[in-house]
């Protein structure tokens, strides 16, 4: 409200507006309040429109862009125990980006018959697929996500070892550790075929992991 001096009053005699004057000011106050409400309402409406647009874009991109998918190769070792021969192998799981093909398998290389003959020289060898129980009894040392090209290169190595002339297994030159070493090298890992490690699957794979810590996913790196 405004202070107003009455005409018949002394210069120092101040008083408040009359009720009529207050009523005349009321429409202006209501108009100002209404404009404020309309302005706030407009801002809220604009905000809601932006939110709806963002949600629509998210849904559109969700349908238009496929989720990232890749095949992962995991390197396993199994130590001597019970009827288990020390062993190294790999598993392949995931989806091929280009085709959408689902992959869930494993590959190892071993002698067809584990007998004293393997100590004397070369014997018949074979590529084997490890079952879920054998994988569960083994230790995953590290994992690497593959491109489609790397996945195809891995499968080419598997087929090359599968089709080698017999006898293809040799404990000193072509055993399971040599097999996974070639696979690791094929996918771009640094590998050292240290003679002292080529009959020790776990130690060999841990050594490979130590040489490639910036590339790998594994128990002591990016994932359990």
Image (cartoon, rainbow, N blue to C red):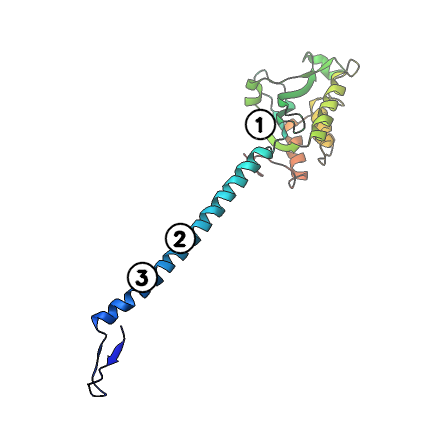
The answer to whether residue 124 is left or right of residue 38 is: right
The answer to whether residue 33 is left or right of residue 72 is: left
Q: Mark 1 falls on what kind of element?
A: strand
Task: State yes or no: discs 3 and 2 in contact (Cβ < 8 Å).
Answer: no
Residue 33 at x, y percent in the picture: 34, 61
Q: Quadrant of residue 185?
A: top right
Considering depth in this image, is 29 or 135 the residue closer to the camera?
29
What residue would you read off at disc 2?
41
* Residue name at image x 25 percent, y 71 percent: 21
* Residue name at image x 29 percent, y 68 percent: 25
* Residue name at image x 28 percent, y 65 percent: 26
**Disc 1 versus disc 3: nearer the observer:** 3
Task: State yes or no: discs 1 and 3 in contact (Cβ < 8 Å).
Answer: no
Q: Mark 2 falls on what kind of element?
A: helix
Sequence-first tag of 1 and 3:
3
Q: For residue 196, say whether it is visible.
A: no
Q: Mark 3 falls on what kind of element?
A: helix
What residue would you read off at disc 3?
30
Q: Local crowd at mark 1 within 10 Å, few (<14), some, or many (≥20)?
A: some
> In the image as oriented, which residue stretches furthest toward the right?
165
Sequence-first tag of 1 and 2:
2
**Disc 3 versus disc 2: nearer the observer:** 3
What residue would you read off at disc 1?
139
**Total number of numbered labels?**
3
Give the CA distance from mark 1 to mark 3: 77 Å
Residue 70 at x, y percent in the picture: 63, 30
């Amino acid at each position: 409200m405004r202070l107003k001096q009455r005409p018949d009053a002394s210069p120092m005699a101040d008083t408040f507006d009359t009720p009529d004057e207050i009523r005349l000011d009321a429409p202006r106050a209501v108009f100002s309040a209404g404009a404020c409400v309309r302005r706030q309402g407009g801002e809220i409406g604009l905000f809601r429109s932006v939110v709806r647009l963002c949600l629509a874009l998210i849904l559109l991109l969700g349908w238009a862009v496929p989720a990232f998918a890749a095949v992962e190769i995991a390197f396993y070792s199994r130590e001597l125990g019970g009827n288990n021969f020390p062993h190294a192998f790999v598993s392949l799981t995931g989806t091929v980006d280009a085709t959408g093909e689902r992959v869930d398998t494993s590959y190892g290389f071993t002698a067809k018959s584990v007998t004293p003959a393997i100590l004397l020289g070369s014997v018949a060898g074979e590529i084997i697929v490890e079952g879920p129980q054998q994988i569960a009894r083994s230790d995953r040392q590290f994992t690497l996500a593959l491109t489609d090209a790397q996945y195809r290169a891995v499968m080419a190595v598997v087929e090359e070892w599968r089709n080698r002339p017999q006898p293809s297994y040799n404990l000193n030159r072509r055993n399971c550790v040599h097999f996974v070493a070639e696979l690791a090298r094929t996918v771009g890992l640094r590998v050292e075929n240290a003679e002292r490690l080529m009959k020790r699957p776990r130690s060999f794979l841990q050594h490979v992991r130590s040489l490639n810590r910036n590339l790998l996913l594994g128990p002591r790196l990016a994932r359990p």
